Every structure is written in structure tokens, then in C-alpha cells.
Amino acid sequence: MDKIVIDGGRRLSGRVPIAGAKNAALPILIATLLAPGEHRLENVPQLVDVSSMLSLLGRIGCPSLVHDNLVRLDTSRVSFCEAPYDLVRKMRASVLALGPLLARCGEAHVSLPGGCAIGVRPIDQHLKGLERLGCQFELSGGYVHGRVDRLVGARVPLDIPSVTGTENVLMAAVLARGESVIENAAREPEIVDVVRFLRSLGAQIEGEGSATLRVQGVDSLSPSTEGYSILPDRIEAGTYLIAGAITGGDVVVERVKPEDLVPVLQVLRAAGCTLEVGDEHVRVTRDGPICPVDVTTRPHPGFPTDMQAQVMALLSLAPGQSVLTETIFENRFMHVPELSRLGADIRTEGNRAVVNGVEQLHGATVMATDLRASASLVLAGLAAEGRTEVLRLYHLDRGYEQLVEKLAALGAGVARVTDDLERLRSAPVSRVGEVG
Ligand code: EPU
């Protein structure tokens, strides 16, 4: 099992380029199905989730070529309208295939994603919304089977502003007959990016970034000849800003959209950091102590749930008490016991985590069950005294491009270690015998 080994206590400084946003790249990749032909996407982050989405597209019949952060995709033909269990189980975002497949083929068979480490995560809003556009669903064999003769525009009030739910309904609505109005739509910057991408294909959408998306359906869409560049990842940027803050360093995140980072910047300021905000960069420094802050996660433009674990690592070193309230997912405190292993003093009470700042964290071996929790352990390890080993890197590989390289370039004592002994142990017995 690979692990990240961190020798903590070094002050990070330097500039770090931020990659394209995972949560914009995933819906945009699958949205290419709506416009048959050759697509060119730039600034696509090199992540396991992106590879999984390209595998899903490959399975559907759409080959791709990847060169660094450029992806070329050919969606001219679709031969298979299914997102099978083996892919959905690896990546929940495969559920985003539902809207585009229904719009493209009139049918879709998508394995139910089930619960995950951060909560139950139902897809009722996706299905209710698509039903309003005329789709019919049947659940059997662990799959949701959807059919539609002709998508027809409608008013779609969502009970919850679900991010991928909004995206699924939107991707179907752009090819529906007539007007659709999605109410209580998610307002996250990634939704805005999906709208801009769809517009580059010829879709007619208004209201991105607000709670009401108004879509005039069109008969067909065509790939943009110029290509499309994915927006910068605000969560990756926020994570590196905290790396600077937690080590009392001086870190500049580059190629970002500072306006998408506002709620995170507010918390960093309240926590005692000094920020310099440019057009496409943010610099963080901290000279004084970290100050305690109460933080509540909310849908955008509130504080993002995807930054809650990382900010908790920071506040675990703030003298005094901070209270973090998680309102988006019901089980997103899986990092608390692991942060405690590093010496943090955190108590959970339902959806609140009460953090009593400690003077120092101490290195230990830790592992996490989701992506952002893993990131918080890396951050805590950077500030901890001694050596921290973070196991189960699978999650980090899903969401952070070149994490170890970027941290090392900022001066962190960090390395990825491939445990050959473990590899040998898990190899077939004959091979172990040969080597031994
Ligand atoms: N919900 C429902 N019914 C639905 C859909 C959602 O009850 O049909 C609930 C969820 O259970 C959750 C809340 O609504 O309690 C919000 O979930 P949402 O649907 O907005 O989340 P998502 O679309 O599944 C995306 C991101 C997540 C991010 C959340 C919230 C992608 C691929 N994933 O998930 O990203 O945490 O929005 O902002 O866009 C991550 O990157 O680490 C990550 C988990």
C-alpha cells in the first residue's frame, strides 16, 4: 500500500499552480455526449476520477486521447447506454451519465451509487427532476433504468439544491422541447462552468450562479471548435492556502478565480491570516497565532463542505474553542478520530465538532475514508512535530493532481513511498517464493 510520509514542522513558501476543478471536469466530460462529434477540453486535471469518467465514456463507445491536461474526446457514436456497477462503485459522479444518456439515446441504465463514507447520498432529486421532463424510471437489480420518448421542458423545483442533481436535470433540459425552469438550483461555481460549456455547444441557458436556471431547449448541439478550458479548482486552492496558513508560511496559489474562494478567504482572515488577493492569485501569510473561528458549511455562496475537514486541521491549532457545523452531509466527520491520533482535541456532538485548540500536533500513522478527510490529515501532518504517515492514498489520487510534488516544491518534507514489501506480500504466492 502506497503512503505519504511527512516530516512536519517546515514552513511552506512559494507559488503553486492550481489545476482544473475536478467537480467541473466530471460533468463537462460526460456532457460532451450531448453534442455528437470531436471535443477538445483543456485544463482537465490528471486525476483518478477523470480517468474513471473517461473509462465510462469509453465503455459507452466514446474514445479519448489524453495529453497532459488536454483531453480530446470523440462522442460521434454511442453504442451502450449504461454506467455499470464496476465504474459507479469507484466514482459516484458516474450518476451524471443519467441526464446526458437519456437526452442522447432516450434510455439510460445507471448502477445506483449507494451510500458512501460521507453519508447516504440519495439521488431522489435527480430522478424527480428528470421525471418532470418526461423521463420514467424503474429500479431493479441495483440499477436505475430510465426511458423517455421526447424530453419536454417543464418547471423543475428541486427540494434540495443538489449539485450533481442540478447538473443532471440541466444536461437533459438543454435538449428538451420548450422551456425548462430549474428552481432552487445549486449555485456552485462548477455549475456556472457547466452552463458556460453547454452554452459553447449552442445551449440556451440563463441564470447561472443564481437559484433559477432558465433553459430554452434546442434540437441539437455541436462541439465547440475552439475547445473549452475547465475553471480552476477552488477546493484545491483552498487546501494549499491552508497549507500555507497552518505552517505559518507564505504561499501563493496561482491560476485561481479569487471570487470563487470568498467564503474560504473570509474564514482564513478571521483565523488570523493575511491575504493578498490579485486577479488570478491569492497569497496567504501568517505571523501571529491562529485564531479560533466558528464555521458552518452551506451550499454556495456559503462555506463549502469540501473545505470543512481542511479548516478543522487548521483550527485544531487555534488557542481557544472553534465550533464547526456540517449541514450538507450527515456523516462528514470521519477525519475527527484520525486528527485526534495526531493530538487534536475535538469532540463531536451530532453535526457539530467542538475543536479545542492544542499547542502542538504530533506525527502518527493515520488514514481516512474520503478525499477531503485525507487532505486534512496531510495538512495536519505538515504542521505536526515529527513524522506522519498517511495511508490509503486512493482518495487523494481521486482529487489532488500531483499533491506530493506540489507540496515538496513549497518546501514540505514529504514523499510518496511505495511499500514494496506490502506489494510482495499481496503478490501471488509463487512470485513471493521466487523472490524469497
Ligand atoms: N441529496 C439528496 N437527494 C439527492 C441529492 C442530494 O438528499 O437527490 C442530499 C445529499 O445526500 C447531501 C446534500 O443533498 O446531503 C447535498 O448533496 P449534493 O447532491 O449537492 O452533492 P453531490 O452532487 O453528490 C457534489 C460534489 C461533492 C460536494 C457536494 C456538495 C461532485 C462530483 N461532487 O456532490 O464533492 O461535496 O456536491 O458541495 O460535484 C468532493 O469533491 O470531495 C465531493 C464530495
Image (spheres, rainbow, N blue to C red):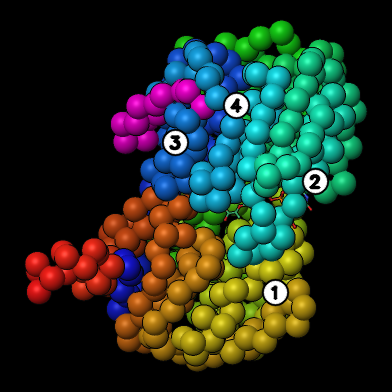
Q: CA distance from mark 1 to mark 4?
A: 42 Å
Mark 2 element type? helix
Q: Position of residue 224 (x, y in %)?
A: 52, 14
Which numbered disc, 1 or 3, marks the residue closer to the eye? 3
The residue under label 1 is 324
Q: Residue at x 46, y 86 (%)?
A: 342
> What residue did someone put label 4 on?
81
Secondary structure of the residue carrying tag 4 is loop
Residue 424 shown left or right of residue 368 in the figure: left
Amino acid carrying label 4: it is Cys
Whether tag 1 and tag 4 are in contact, CB under 8 A, the answer is: no
Image quarter of residue 196 = top right
Q: Earlier in the sequence, mark 1 or mark 3?
A: 3
Distance of label 1 from label 3 (alpha carbons): 37 Å
Mark 4 vs mark 3: give the one in front: 4
Q: CA distance from mark 2 to mark 4?
A: 20 Å
Answer left or right for 282 relative to 319.
Answer: left
Q: Which residues are magenta?
A: 60-71
Q: Determine which quarter of the picture holds residue 247.
A: bottom left
Q: Earlier in the sequence, mark 1 or mark 4?
A: 4
Q: Residue at x 42, y 60 (%)?
A: 394
Residue under label 2, please give it: 124
